Amino acid sequence: MSYVAEEIISQPECWSQAAELATRNESAFPRTGERVAVIGCGTSWFMAQSYAVLRESAGHGETDAFAASQMPTGRAYDRVIAITRSGTTSEVCDVLRRIDTPSTAIVGEEGTPATELATDTVAMPFADERSVVQTRYATSVLALLRAHLGQDMSTVVADAREALSANLPVDPTAVEQITFLGDGWTVGLAHEAGLKLREAATFWTESYPAMEYRHGPISITGPGRVTWMFGEAPDGLSDDVARTGGTLVRGTRDPMAELVVAQRFAVAVAEHRGLDPDSPRHLSRSVILP
């Protein structure tokens, strides 16, 4: 079994530990009413997007999410949260180095550059990974942040356990292309699902906010292609996809648990193509620039 497959299986337990960790690190998290920026790269950026929507929509305060390389200068924030599995990603460390705002680094291990640069650290060694392709670290960070917002993660964990044994919604050997869709906080999950398939299986995926699907992306849908929705689908989406001859996938579990299904699908496609999901093309565990 690949490292990434083992790490996918471990997610329910990691999410439970993350939820418990949230109760022991109150001072490292933003207070209600604070203006917050959340930064990351790749998968971590997508988790930042989901958290930003969840925090602001729950009334905790204005929250922005940026790819670390695109963090604007001159904006006033009360706290910056940096999501970085390795704690070594150059763009994240560059932001932490140049700001004087209170900051929190959420990392897979202590003693890394990000932990030395940030004001506070939340370390999650139980969720760190051997694989290049991120799965459990990223989802555990989101579980941590959801728990901090007061969400009950017990049902989410139960949904994840179910997602590990559920049948895949479509045959991984018979799909040509997938467009992942989300709405609100699940847009980040849609982007992440697409990235997992591209990384692990060099598979053609796209991802969009669901209401943007009709504004161009629907033109790629057709027989042998799938539209995969995270969360509640907009009115009419099912009929729109049916008219193209494509297949619509909609899960009934918590959207974060449905991401687990997409992760499993990515590994299945990689194995079908004879690829090693632990050795994705052109990628390393952390991007460290000279």
Image: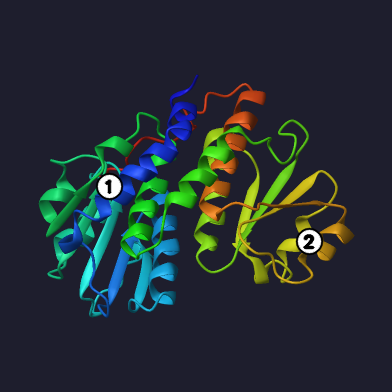
- Per the image, label 1 sits on a secondary structure element best described as loop
Residue nearer the viewer, 227 or 113: 227
Q: Which amino acid does label 2 sit on?
A: Ser
Position of 110 compared to 37: left or right?
left
The image quarter containing residue 76 is: bottom left
Packing grade of label 1 (10 A; few <14, some 14-19, many >=20) is many
Residue nearer the viewer, 69 or 109: 109
* Residue with the mark numbered 1: 89
Q: Which residue is drawn at 23% across and 44% down?
A: 88
The image quarter containing residue 171 is: top right
Packing grade of label 2 (10 A; few <14, some 14-19, many >=20) is few
Q: Is residue 86 above or below residue 148?
A: above
Number of on-image labels: 2
The image quarter containing residue 201 is: top right
Regarding residue 68, the answer to whether it shows in the image is no
Residue nearer the viewer, 71 or 119: 119
Position of 206 compared to 246: left or right?
left
Of pointers 2 and 1, the one earlier in the residue sequence: 1
Q: What residue type is labelled 1?
A: Thr
Q: Distance between the residues labelled 2 and 1?
A: 36 Å
Q: Residue at x 27, y 57 (%)?
A: 82
- Per the image, label 2 sits on a secondary structure element best described as helix
| Residue 227: image tag | none
Q: Position of residue 94 (x, y in %)?
A: 21, 57
Q: Where is residue 265 in the image (x, y as percent from the top left)?
A: 62, 36
Q: Position of residue 169 (x, y in %)?
A: 71, 41
* Residue with the mark numbered 2: 219
Q: Is residue 7 above or below residue 229?
A: above
Position of 259 compared to 10: left or right?
right
Q: Residue at x 65, y 44 (%)?
A: 204
Q: Which residue is drawn at 35% across and 36% down?
A: 285
Residue nearer the viewer, 76 or 240: 240
